[in-house]
Amino acid sequence: MPLEMKTACMKCDDALEGMGEARVCSYECTFRSPDATDMKQSYSSCGGELLRRPRRRARE
């Protein structure tokens, strides 16, 4: 099952680029990197640790 590449930050609702840097937890809660830093790399609603979201290769 592929990771859902969400398009908006769950904290500030700013757009996230598909190949851009973001942070996710194991429940796929997704945040912009600056917001994740403000949250100390942890999301209190699910208790998940926020890690760098992997980037997908562009489709050929």
Image (cartoon, helix red, strand yellow):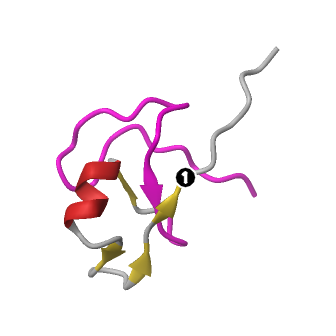
Q: Which residues are magenta?
A: 1-28
Q: Residue 47: horizontal and vertical position, in percent?
A: 37, 85
Residue at figure coordinates x 47%, y 60% from the top left: 24
Residue wearing tag 1 = 53
Residue nearest the viewer, comparing 36 with 43: 36
Q: Please say if 12 is above or below 48.
A: above
Image quadrant of residue 48? bottom left
Q: Residue 23: horizontal and vertical position, in percent?
A: 44, 56
Asked if the stretch drawn in magenta spans residue 9, the answer is yes
Report the residue that reaches farthest toward the top: 60
Mark 1 packing: few (<14 Cα in 10 Å), some, or many (20+)? Answer: many
Which three-letter amino acid code belongs to the residue tagged 1?
Arg
Q: Please say if 43 is above or below 35.
A: below
Residue at figure coordinates x 30%, y 47% from the top left: 9
Judge left or right: residue 51 versus residue 56.
Answer: left
Residue at figure coordinates x 63%, y 40% from the top left: 55
Residue nearest the viewer, comparing 30 with 41: 41
Asked if the stretch drawn in magenta spans residue 4, the answer is yes
Secondary structure mainly formed by the magenta segment:
loop
Q: Please say if 25 is above or below 55.
A: below
Judge left or right: residue 55 versus residue 30.
Answer: right
Q: Residue 44: horizontal and vertical position, in percent?
A: 27, 81
Residue at figure coordinates x 26%, y 50% from the top left: 34
Helix, strand, or loop for circle 1? loop
Residue nearest the viewer, comparing 9 with 1: 9
